[in-house]
Amino acid sequence: MLTAIFGDGHACCERDRDKNRNKDEYEGLALEQVITSARKNGAERFVFLGDVIGYGPNPIDCINLMKRVFVRKTKDGIYTQIPNRHMLLGNHGLMFLKGEIPKYIDDDAEASIERIWEQLGVDISKDPVRPAIPGKADEILKSIHKGIKLPQRSLRRRFSDLWHGRKDYMSPEDLTEIEKSMDPETREKFQRARELKIKEDKFKPYHDFFSSLPCELDLGKEGGQEKLMFAHAFPLSMAKYADQLGIDKNAIGFLEVYIIKREDWISYVKDPKNYYELDDTAIENLEAYVKGQTKNLGDLGLTEEKKQEVLDLRRRTAIAEDVVKFMPEGYTLFIGHNHDDFIVDGKEGRRIISPGAVFNPRAEPGDEDYEYAHYVLYESSVPQDVICGRVKYNRDKVNRYMEEAKHGN
């Protein structure tokens, strides 16, 4: 079966309102282009490696797009994945669910989470950007229930209908009447519960969607014929090897451990625009440390604070050439999160494949992936052949959308 594998879409698609308004100009951005290209090339199965949101300008539109392609909603309101459509949870989706921003997440990533709330119509200037966990507003209401003494049965019924979503409007006069029956402390809690309820109702469909997504997929599990594993970041199922690989178990839980090639990690840290200018001795120490030849990083000519930053980065990075040694025999692992495309082969048929990013927000003009979206095609019957695909999209349009999004448009 020919499978299209791609990830890190990062909110890079057309806006729904532009699709409807400018049909003649509609071209599709990174996500649409990859899906269309894969279909034209005969893909029968699609696997998305996570991070449909984050960084890009149109998170809600991208979520809606991926819902149409990957999932169906049952009569009970439960999201289930379409056969041969597999979508995984990424670290940005997990941040949105939890409302927790890890300390090492940059400002652009945090702003992208706020952008979702803004596009949902939540005024983040008045409310902390944290998830409205469904049911929290009801908890507050129950805690103040005895303080609400509604004088009329009809008013009690209308309030109950409003609260439980059977109607979406109550007249200002009725709300004033309700609040008049409360003492000041109860009134303050009630007003907070109402605000939270509005936020909950907007958040719930997205909470349910992201909650339905698995963190990883193993097609070889329970007797499956294909020894294929898919994950956004370092797989949770391999967390038992964290100490041997020198990585942070907590970061694994946040889907925040990158898998990258050894030489790419060294090149990244050596690049002065990312970190610091290192002398030849420091570079030798760094390379020996990453290759596992020494457990002492040396001073690198850095302050303790800067050295700690390098160590923290290393603990959030699993070296692909080491990871492949701990994989089950004959397995291929497809991984996202790092935005790089590479293949690392190990012994006894073990392999790691990173398709690169659909949208790389850090790419600059002139970079190979600045205006190209990446994906791979994998044929199960011929596992040696991996087709690395890329498709061009309108990066200038994305940049324009980004500027508009920063100004709330």
Image: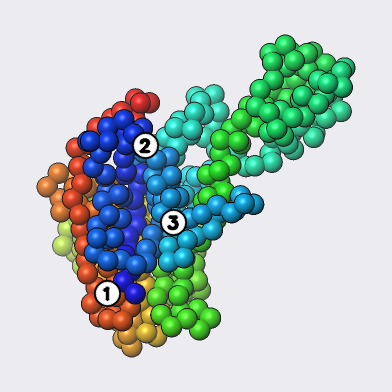
The residue shown at (54%, 24%) is 126
Q: Do the residues labelled 1 and 2 touch (CB within 8 Å)?
A: no
The quadrant holding residue 310 is bottom left
- Tell me residue 270's x, y (percent): 21, 57
- Residue at the disc numbered 2: 16
Left or right: 39 with respect to 209? left
Q: Which mark is residue 294?
A: none
Left or right: 83 with respect to 186? left
Q: Which amino acid does label 2 sit on?
A: Asp
- Tell me residue 235's x, y (percent): 45, 67
Image quarter in which the C terminus is found = top left
Residue furthest toward the bottom? 348
Distance from label 1 to label 2 (Cα)?
39 Å
The residue shown at (27%, 74%) is 344
The residue shown at (57%, 49%) is 208
Dot 2 falls on a residue whose secondary structure is helix
- Residue at the disc numbered 1: 344
